[in-house]
């Protein structure tokens, strides 16, 4: 076989493999869409069972696109009373100290979110405690967090989407502006649900707090003899 024939055959084999990969990926995404109601019910149930949380950390690969937008939007939507009880941050797995790209800052700004002060940081075990909710953007990131520590609760943010969709929220890195807008649309839908659920957990706990009845102190009426 000559060089050109070998190259042609190699190209055909690569095309076939690429087609198979695309087919399998399409089937996987379609399967995730069909299973979305199950994943969503499970995620909502676990949030209600495990809450309230003491801290929330949003995590994506580089901490410059998805997780900072989710963090700052979450802060903006959270009721002040709930915000006082939560430590909120974001992190990634690579490249600390980077700012969000201009496209991300521009789009976020058009939606009332200022990412100008954001700088990326790396997720580490000491940032995750027993009462920490770690919110990831991809299913593989859930496994990566579990490789760092068994502590905390891990949520795949896309599972909260009110619309049937794959579990992963697409990384817009090197993608078009349309992909970035679509990604931020999904982040916003899911974060709004998360805020509602966590606010509900906080209200449920606060309503269970009981202060001593008037005229009583440690089980005695004021003025009772010792």
Image (cartoon, helix red, strand yellow):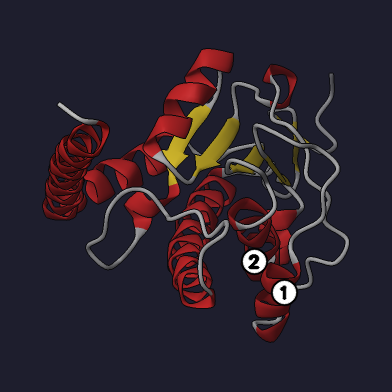
Residue 98 place in picture, x, y as percent: 82, 48
From this view, report whether residue 143 is shown above or below residue 31: above
Q: Is residue 74 left or right of residue 81?
A: left
Residue 135 is at least partly visible in this image: yes
Residue 32 place in picture, x, y as percent: 19, 48
From this view, report whether residue 169 is shown above or below residue 155: below
Q: CA distance from mark 2 to mark 1?
A: 7 Å
Residue 105 place in picture, x, y as percent: 74, 71
Q: Which residue is mark 1?
A: 113
Q: Residues within 10 Å of mark 2 (few under 14, many from 20)?
A: many
Q: Is residue 97 left or right of residue 201?
A: right
Residue occupying image coordinates x 51% and y 75%:
181
User: Which image quadrant for residue 97?
Assistant: top right
User: Which image quadrant for residue 74?
Assistant: bottom right
Q: Nearer the viewer, residue 31 or 50?
A: 31
Q: Nearer the viewer, residue 172 or 35?
A: 172
Q: Nearer the viewer, residue 12 or 151?
A: 12
Query: Is the residue under label 1 in contact with that under label 2 (CB below 8 Å)?
Result: yes
Q: Residues within 10 Å of mark 1 (few under 14, many from 20)?
A: some
Residue 149 is at least partly visible in this image: no
Residue occupying image coordinates x 80% and y 37%:
96
Residue occupying image coordinates x 57% and y 59%:
174
Marked residue nearer the N-terminal end (2 or 1): 2
Question: Secondary structure under badge 2?
Answer: helix
Q: Which residue is mark 2?
A: 73
Residue 55 place in picture, x, y as percent: 67, 38
Q: Is residue 90 left or right of residue 160?
A: right
Q: Is residue 25 left or right of residue 139?
A: left
């Amino acid at each position: 076989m000559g060089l050109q024939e070998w190259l042609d055959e190699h190209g055909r084999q690569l095309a076939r493999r690429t087609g198979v990969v695309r087919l399998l990926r399409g089937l996987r995404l379609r399967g995730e869409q069909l299973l979305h109601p199950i994943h969503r019910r499970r995620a909502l149930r676990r949030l209600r069972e495990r809450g309230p949380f003491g801290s929330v950390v949003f995590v994506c690969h580089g901490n410059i696109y998805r997780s900072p937008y989710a963090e700052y939007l979450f802060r903006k939507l959270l009721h002040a009373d709930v915000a006082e009880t939560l430590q909120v941050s974001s992190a990634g797995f690579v490249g600390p100290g980077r700012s969000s790209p201009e496209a991300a800052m521009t789009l976020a700004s058009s939606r009332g979110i200022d990412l100008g002060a954001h700088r990326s940081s790396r997720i580490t075990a000491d940032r995750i405690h027993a009462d920490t909710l770690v919110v990831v953007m991809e299913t593989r990131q859930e496994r990566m967090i579990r490789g760092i520590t068994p502590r905390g609760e891990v949520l795949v943010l896309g599972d909260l989407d009110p619309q049937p969709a794959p579990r992963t929220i697409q990384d817009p890195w090197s993608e078009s502006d349309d992909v970035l807008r679509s990604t931020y649309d999904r982040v916003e839908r899911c974060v709004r649900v998360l805020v509602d659920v966590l606010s509900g957990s906080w209200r449920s706990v606060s309503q269970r707090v009981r202060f001593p009845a008037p005229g009583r102190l440690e089980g005695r009426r004021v003025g009772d003899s010792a």
